[in-house]
Image (cartoon, helix red, strand yellow):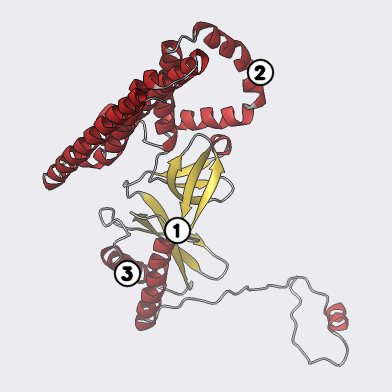
Amino acid sequence: MGKTAWLCIAKYMFGATLLSLVVWFVTAEVENWLKRKKYRFAQILPSLKIYGILLIFLSAFYLIIPCLPLSSHVYNLTYKAVVFGLFFLVFWAIGVFVEFVLGLYSEKVFRNIPITGLLWAIIRWTILSIGILVGLDAIGIPITPMITTLGVGGVAVALAVQDVLSNIFAGFTMLVAHQIKPGDYIIVGDGIEGFVKDITWRNTVLYSPLMGIDVIVPNNNMAQSIIKSAAAGSGKFGFVVSVGVSYDTDLMKAYKIVSDVAMRIINEIPEVNNQYPPIVAYQEFGNSSININVLFRMHNPAPLARWKVTDLFVKEVKKAFDEAGVEIPFSQHDIHIRDVNVEQFEKLMGKGGSKCDYTNRQ
């Protein structure tokens, strides 16, 4: 390269470096000012600063291309690559900015549609696809035949990746139907349970607080399973604990003791929703006891929170029953023998056994 070419390169690179420093300094000052004012737009400035600097240097390279001693073929390829890169970078930055803005105002923009990884992927790749098409058109590649080809070939692609597409559509259906959203606590049909962390293009990610792990469930399985869901923040998740009392117990006395314990629990354990009084009711005549159930409404439906309730309930009820003389019976069965042949029964029990007095009831 000649001296003129080097001067051209040095001029544009120096200008790009100087402009990048100005952009870096200005965005840093604006970011600090926004942080002091506690504006959330400060969070996006570091990313926009990097994209801006990349755009400056890529633009400088675009201006340097005529200064380079390139053949016409190489020059044409380089020119088209840089132009396409500029459009790709601009639309990528637009996608990041749109995603951030929609995240700030998601409640107003999307309303009932939950914000998940799948929704962000749809937005991001839609904007990026538009950028790719615009970039291809800018460098002289016709996009109409390409779109037609993609439409025809889309059938074959859809057959090849039908599992992937079924997961995408299942996830999108869950979003649009507003069936579940991040933060909900769900129990999937086969016993998997946890908090919904995210819904991606392929999976629903659950966090199991009991095991401390993430559970990855394909969206297609979610769509085909029976799901029990407790909406985040509803405080309506029902949890039942029970205790049995003997048949000789004063039921009203036991009822009052259990009710008093339940009221103490909803005021002592923050995971229990004290806006809903516990429901206490006798439920059944058991084999050895009359069983009484208590229904609590939980803010936090996780197993560990339920264990807290069970632990305190068992200790407090046992203590109160002991003080009041209420019996919690052991499991027992009464066996009534009717129409027994005494001679055959003695033979069955064995000879030389202890003498028993049997009554033959007719």
Q: Taking 117 as reference, is 207 above or below it?
A: below
Q: Position of residue 107 (x, y in %)?
A: 27, 33
Which quadrant: the C terminus? bottom right
Q: Is disc 3 surrounded by few (<14), some (14 to 19) or many (20+) residues within 10 Å? A: some
Residue 183 coordinates in the image, percent (x, y): 38, 46
Q: Position of residue 353 (x, y in %)?
A: 82, 91
Q: At 35% across and 26% down in the image, what residue appears?
A: 3
Q: Is residue 315 visible?
A: yes
Residue nearest the viewer, comparing 175 with 278: 175
Q: Nearer the viewer, mark 3 or mark 2?
A: 2
Residue 261 has which mark? 3
> Residue at 48% across / 45% down in the picture?
205
Are the residues at dot 1 and dot 2 in contact (C-beta closer than 8 Å)? no
Residue 216's place in the image compared with 314, above or below, is: above
Determine the image quadrant of residue 261: bottom left
Spatial separation of the CA atoms under disc 1 and disc 2: 42 Å
User: Which residue type does callout 3 highlight?
Assistant: Val
Quarter of the picture holding the N terminus? top left
* Amino acid on which the number 2 mark rests in the picture: Ala
Crowd around label 2: few <14 · some 14–19 · many ≥20 (10 Å): few
Question: In the rendered structure, which amino acid carries the disc numbered 1?
Answer: Pro
| Pointer 1 or 2: first along the chain | 2
- The circle drawn on residue 156 is 2
Q: Label 1 belongs to which residue?
A: 209
